[in-house]
Image: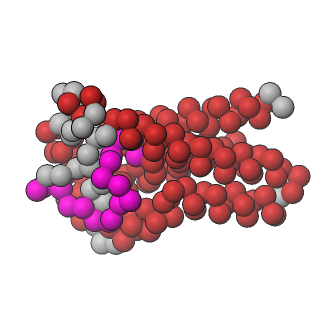
Amino acid sequence: MSFFTRVKGVNGSPAEVRILSKIQSTVGAQPGAVAVARGMSHFGEHALGWVAIAGIGAVLDAPRRRQWAGVAVGAVGSHAASIVIKRVVRRPRPDDPSVHINVSTPSKLSFPSSHATSTTAAAVLLGRLTGLPLTAVLVPPMLLSRLVLGVHYPTDVLAGSALGAISAAAILKFEGDK
């Protein structure tokens, strides 16, 4: 057990568990919601869906191949950063009778959400590349899906999204320096 797991509040607070339960009993109870959330989970696993999109973009848009590569690097790099933080913080995933776990996960660690991290990084970078408002379109559904599936607390997805935005900013700064 790390120092962080002994710090008060590392495990989900009663308020976070209530929010999670409420999301599952409202949004998560809609027909098809869990199936869609599972599909999003599989797409975002290890940032592989974002890497695939970046690869397709690089093949189809050779003049901007470097920027498409930046999308892949941002998604994978932010995912890697989230894994490092998970291993330091060691916050366990939700474990409350009122929370239903609706998908398997590669680890028992919850903070931050790697899906939220890589999705935010990819959405920021793809939005910058395409000129489309992809952050507003892609990020909220991915964050919500992690709660519908019961595998993260609300603060996990918010912190993951913040980390993804910071990662994307670093990629954009690097690209701007070239």
Res 158 visible:
no
> Is residue 99 rendered to the left or right of residue 121?
left
Q: What secondary structure is the magenta-colored segment mainly?
A: loop
| Magenta region includes residue 172 | no
Q: Is residue 49 above or below residue 177?
A: below
Q: Depth check: 73 or 65 in front? A: 73
Q: Is residue 34 above or below residue 163?
A: below
| Magenta region includes residue 111 | yes
Q: Position of residue 144 (x, y in %)?
A: 37, 52
Q: Depth check: 131 or 117 in front? A: 117
Q: Is residue 35 above or below residue 73?
A: below
Q: Which corner quadrant holds the N terminus?
A: top left
Q: Which corner quadrant holds the C terminus?
A: top right
Res 64 visible:
yes
Q: Which residues are magenta?
A: 97-113
- Residue visible at 81% across and 63% down in the picture: 59
- Residue visible at 42% across and 37% down in the picture: 85
